[in-house]
Amino acid sequence: MQVIKPVVILGLLISSLLANAEDRGRAYVSNQEGGVSIINLNTMETEGTIDVQAKNPRGIGITEDGQYLITANKDDENLSVIDLKTNQFVKHISVGKNPEFVRVFRGQVFVSTEPASTGKPPVAGKEDDDKDEPKIPARIVVVDLAKGKKTRDIVGGPETEGIEFSKSGKEIIVTNEADNTITVHNFSNGKLLKTISTKKYGDRPRGIKVAPNGKYYVSTLEYGNNFIVLDSQFKHLKTVPTGESPYGISFDREGKRLFVASSKAKTLEVFDTTNFEKIKEIPTGRRCWHFSFSPDEKDILLACGKSDEVLVIDAEKLEVTKRIPNKEIPWGIVVYPKAMGSLDSVK
């Protein structure tokens, strides 16, 4: 009979402990009819929820150090600040009507507020019935987390939907769906630097992302059924067809592939960024708007609000491997440690 030496047993135990100690992190899902779901990325199971003490959380973000999670709460016109060490609510910060899209950048929260929005999108191909009503500009409200309050706001176009920052951090870029524009602003003072009309290429710009190398931008046009590519000076380079109603968009970490969530086509589409040729269409579910890579980039998690689920997609095989039930209308998703996604990025 073979005798297993104690040193061998100890080595096996240490190896086992090290393997179990590898933590892939957590995903946080904002739910329009609930709070925030926590998904354990080691098990790909929902392990808990966070009460944000507000109604209709949509936009969601995490600070760079992982200390705080932020949600934008539509019905209560505020942000919720959550301490991620305890998963407990800390406070609300008032920001204004219809807060939706959230980005956390350099210790500040940037959130779109939409005083003109009714909450219902216009019908594709039909003119706005309210031509005589003024198009009220959206406000990108800037909140200093250290001070715990709004410090300034940036005037965008009507119904701002997406927020991005240039590679240098000197510009903030926003998409304005109601007047079909992308506007570029000075990061420090919010001054309007440039307005790009998307009308020629398609209506309702939604998602906006800078390439990891900083050399170009991409923006989805929901009613154009495409995305456009803009150079570093925001000049149009290319229009690329997608499935119906594209919204969330993100590069992978290296910028070699681009992912687009086409909600009405019920697909997550993958493009090769060397030529913007489509690699694959991954069948998804209903109203899948936002997604995130896992921190190790092995998986993609996609929130599908009308299918009552979060999909797990193998990032290499580009196949759905799991469906995590969620019946509270999942809207947005971010992870920590931080990763690339439609609501976040790694700078």
Image (cartoon, rainbow, N blue to C red):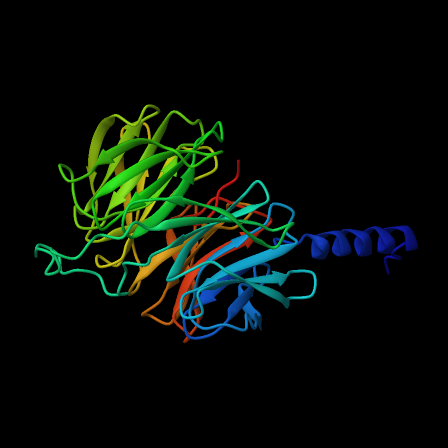
Count of picture labels:
0
Can you say whether 266 is above or below 45 in the image? above
Q: Position of residue 79 (x, y in %)?
A: 51, 61
Q: Is residue 46 visible?
A: yes
Q: Nearer the viewer, residue 137 or 245?
A: 137
Left/right placement of residue 29 relative to residue 183 reads right
Residue at 32% across / 49% down in the picture?
160
Left/right placement of residue 323 relative to residue 284 reads right
Q: Position of residue 184 (x, y in %)?
A: 35, 34
Q: Is residue 251 visible?
A: no
Residue at 77% across / 56% down in the picture?
17
Q: Nearer the viewer, residue 263 or 154?
A: 154
Left/right placement of residue 242 relative to residue 98 reads left
Q: Position of residue 123 (x, y in %)?
A: 13, 60
Quarter of the image where one finds residue 115: bottom left
Q: Position of residue 202 (x, y in %)?
A: 16, 43
Quarter of the image where one finds residue 275: top left
